Image (cartoon, grey):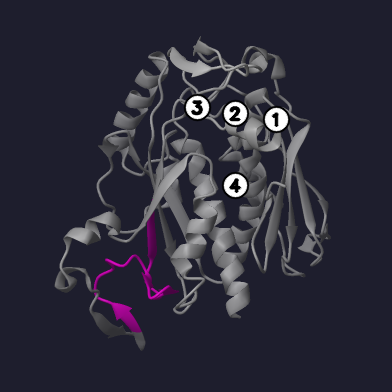
Amino acid sequence: MARNSIGKNITITSFGESHGDSVGVVIDGFPSNFTIDLNALQSFVDRRKPGQSDITTPRKEADTVKILSGFYNGKSLGSPIAIVIPNLDAKPADYEALKDVYRPGHADWLYQEKYQHRDHRGGGRSSARITAGWVAAGALAIQYLKQQGIQVTAWVNQVWTIQAPDAVNTPSPDSIEHNKVRCWHPETADEMIAAISQAKNDGDSLGGVIRCVVDGMPAGVGEPVFGKLQAILGLYLLNINAVKGIAFGDGFSSSTMKGSEHNDELTMVEGRIQGVSNHAGGIVGGMSTGDAIQMDVAFKPTSTIALTQQTVDVNGNQVELSATGRHDPCVLPRAVPIIEAMTALAIMDLLIETR
């Protein structure tokens, strides 16, 4: 039996397939009497939808959100919130040639091995298309956190070998949304766009890194033993399609530092303990420090590429595959709201438990 739910105090259950009738989510545990901004919800989901630009998949989906339950007169009822997003531009015929061929880098053969039956149309259940429902749920969590003074901001920090300079302060949403790659630094964004366009023309793909910062966190969220804040965040973020790694604060570079270099000395600022630096990324001993949480999330290159690759078919024959269909040459630009959504859901779950 596949696991399709995540969360303890607020649970989301995902449903749908890439080229099925629709995708969506059921949210259980969302507080009652909360005013939901439907326009903000739709705008947040729109940031993930396909067909945004010439560096994303050409699939065109409106991704119009429809709330079926748990909502009345502008407010949540406390009962399960069911959200459905129709698939209007599904083209299952595009994948007929892949019905009996296992694509390199995809879960095709593993899905067949584990469940003895699969939906080959665009990856079916394992497609990133299903994250549309996650983003809808995360949009509500974003609204909830804003009421608590917590802001989640993510941006594309690296594509391939092209990396943005470190931002002194958290970039503004306007600076991130100003270009189609969602990098706050204009000159770096232009380089990234050119690299993605070249990979697309070559029939290839690129990976990269999304940086996510959480501002306004109270101290003490998370557990000191099991249930550490970084572990819960990792649970949500590492379940996102194509994510291969996550680093907090200085991450792997901390292994090359001395304790005297990495320790964040403490001071008092306006009656509150605060770090002089933030090498720890806002998490110490499994709990939030109150400083900004900083995470780098690494994405692999998109697996579906037009270049010829060696693979096997359902009968075990060695074959060559030049994949067709609609896909992103780089998933990073559309993954920014997915990172924000899953981060917000993880933190909201912990805040409900803490309080």
Quarter-wise, where is residue 93 in the image? top right
Three-letter code, disc 1: Arg
Q: Is 29 placed above or below 6 here?
A: below
> For the residue carrying disc 4, how many other residues have a C-alpha within 10 Å: few (<14), some (14-19), or many (20+)?
many
Indicate which label's residue lies in the foreground, 4 or 3: 3
Q: Residue at x 23, y 78 (%)?
A: 265
Residue 99 point in image, percent of width and height: 66, 17
Residue 44: numbered disc: 4
> For the residue carrying disc 3, how many other residues have a C-alpha within 10 Å: few (<14), some (14-19), or many (20+)?
many
Circles 1, 3 touching at the beta carbon (< 8 Å): no
Circles 2, 1 touching at the beta carbon (< 8 Å): yes
Write down the residue under mark 3.
328
Q: How far apart, in angstroms, are the residues tagged by discs 2 and 1?
A: 8 Å
Residue 139 point in image, percent of width and height: 62, 53
Residue 118: numbered disc: 1
What's drawn in magenta, residue-wise?
273-296
Circles 2, 4 touching at the beta carbon (< 8 Å): no
Q: Is 342 placed above or below 92 here?
A: below
Write down the residue under mark 2.
108
Q: Earlier in the sequence, mark 2 or mark 4?
A: 4
Q: Earlier in the sequence, mark 1 or mark 3?
A: 1
Q: Nearer the viewer, residue 270 or 344?
A: 344
Secondary structure of the residue carrying numbered label 4? helix
Q: Nearer the viewer, residue 20 or 192?
A: 20
Q: How far apart, in angstroms, are the residues tagged by discs 4 and 3?
A: 19 Å
Q: How far apart, in angstroms, are the residues tagged by discs 3 and 2?
A: 18 Å
Q: Is residue 280 magenta?
A: yes
